[in-house]
Image: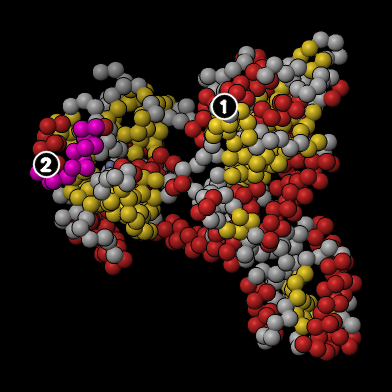
Amino acid sequence: MSEIIVTLPDKSKKKFKSKVSVLDIASSIGEGLARAAIAGEINGKPVDLDTQITADSDLKILTFKDEKGKQIFWHSTAHLLAQAVKELFPDAVLAIGPAIENGFYYDFDVKKPFSLEDFEKIEAKMNELAKQDLKITRETKSKKEAIDLFEKQGNRYKKEILEQNIKGDSASFYTQGNFSDMCIGPHLPGTGKIQAVKLLKVAGAYWKGNEKNKMLQRIYGISFPDKKQLKEFIGLQEEAQKRDHRKIGKALDLFSFHPASAGCVYWHPKGFIIFNELENFWRQEHIKRGYTEIQTPQIFNKSLWEQSGHWEHYKDEMFTFKVDDEVYSLKPMDCPDSIVVYQTKKRSYRELPLRFNEIGRIFRNELSGTLGGLFRVRQITQDDAHIFAMPDQIQKEISRIIEFVKSFYAIFDFNPEIYLSTRPDKAMGSKEMWDKAESDLKKALEANNMEYGLKEKDGAFYGPKIDIHMRDCLNRDWQLATIQLDFQLPNRFKIRYVGSDGKEHEPVMIHRVIFGSFERFIGILIEEFAGAFPLWLAPVQTTVIPIADRHNKYAEKIAGTLRENGVRVEIDSRQEKVEYKIREAQLQKVPYVLVLGDREEQNNTITVRDRSGKVEQKVNVNEFLSKTLKEIAEKTIKS
Ligand SMILES: [Zn+2]
Ligand SMILES: [Zn+2]
């Protein structure tokens, strides 16, 4: 037998004399890796650790650090959950149990819904079975054997999956202890790797998501290879609940939703202040950088989307309706409309780069089940911009946009993470054009001293792009800004400019957003600041509290001075105790509370209490005003 060459992800090669298991290879690299190993990936295909390699292959050892490794780990824990449920509730019928983005679930057909006490028992049983470190093995049964088994078990769900989804005439099963489940795998080598388990919630779920089918009980959970990671996860969960923008949005009276317009935001006065402040800031920054703002319609004849190509790709996400027997839609994106504006006259190279910014009010027909607070809505406000440029202006223009994004995020203390996505296999335009564009983007990133990750072949078919992400205080990753080059739309719409040679040329189009959407961005801000916004965004910047009724007039005077200078002030003259009113203002996260009584009135001063509880007495109101205005103008973030 000839020797086997295994190529590892770092391109290093290992030679073996005869067939060898994935786990053996992991051990040959290091004992630590062998312990952390969850599964392998041979030539891109995930496999169990005991899989034998018999021919030259590429191999990656998957651990919990890999997304795929996590998925296998969590899916294996779903089996453990099913095993525990079957031991405690032998009548439960198993449906499906996949891994999800954060953990796993398993659907059970049971007579009585699971209670929270059941959770404790199930968790304890899972831990017990994990401790036994049961070996997990794979075997194959013929389809007939499997069907007989499911009929005997009275499991119509597995039978249905087998009949509808499994091609070929056999099915694989994974067994641990006396529990066995049909599954493609791969799986952990044993239950002992699962060191920490937490069941999170139970919810009703229809079989196959169809409400005509039976409602099953879905148990969600998460698991980790060590207990410390579970502790961290629970800490983050608790923090996330405290910071949930839907909860804070209600407590601070910022926005609401109503079934009359599911997925569309009702901005209340206080929330709309934040929206408007962001919009004003955004507008000012664009004026400074030579953009001109446009506003285009919200309903369009579908012919425009046919020309742009959106109809072909996005039809299902669009809201359509008929006008005079013609199909119209609500706007799903702004791009073709800025082209319409571009084309209203002959353009000269002297006008380029031509930068249109637009507050785009767009609509996407998201499924009801996927809507979630401000993070996923049907009516989206985009901070869009479209730039028309000559090909040799790309590098400089992209560089300007990167500088723009950087300075924007610095205002919010966000640390951007940048990714460059390159030419996909199916791409429009010549290879030379792509190479040039990609190198322009790289140079622009380097000119700004930006470190970036490469996403090979992940560009849109119409051009390469730069995506800018941020990681929030809960360690969640958000994609916010995106900068996309587009060779396609200019071609589809035949847009031109007259060059210095007097001839017509095709410009390149750059699509660009910075916030992404106002709704989502505000949701992120609410959670990031836990409602305690920097002064410039705070809906109420100062609450004035007169100690007794006789101080109301003085309170009015002070508030008047601040208000005239553009500070957002509220007076709390209710007949409540001062302490109560201070506490209320603190819960509302008001940055400054001014307490006014006899002493303040006699000396013509104010007492200032900030959000951290620090109190300063005998403050001159003009001094406070100028400090406040400075803090607003500088958009200071106080920690
Ligand atoms: Zn499985
Ligand atoms: Zn666009």
Q: In the rendered view, would you say 290 is above or below 84? A: above
| Percent position of residue 237, x then y | 48, 60
Depth check: 539 or 364 in front? 364
Q: Earlier in the sequence, mark 1 or mark 2?
A: 2
In the foreground, 638 or 385 = 385
Above or below, 354 against 270 in this view is: above
Report the side of 434 relative to 71 (left or right): right
Which quadrant does the C terminus fall into? bottom right
Relative placement, left or right, of 445 versus 232 is right
* Res 221 → quadrant: bottom left
Residue for badge 2: 151
Neighbor class of circle 2 (other Cα within 10 Å; few <14, some 14-19, many 20+) is few
Give the quarter of the image for residue 394: top right
Q: Residue at x 55, y 56 (%)?
A: 257
Reading the image, the residue beneath label 1 is 326
Measuring 77% from the left and 83% from the top, which residue is drawn there?
546
Percent of width and height locating residue 138: 21, 38
The residue carrying mark 1 has its beta carbon less than 8 Å from ligand 2:
no
Q: Nearer the viewer, mark 1 or mark 2?
A: 1
Residue 328 inside the magenta-drawn segment: no
The image quadrant of residue 168 is: top left
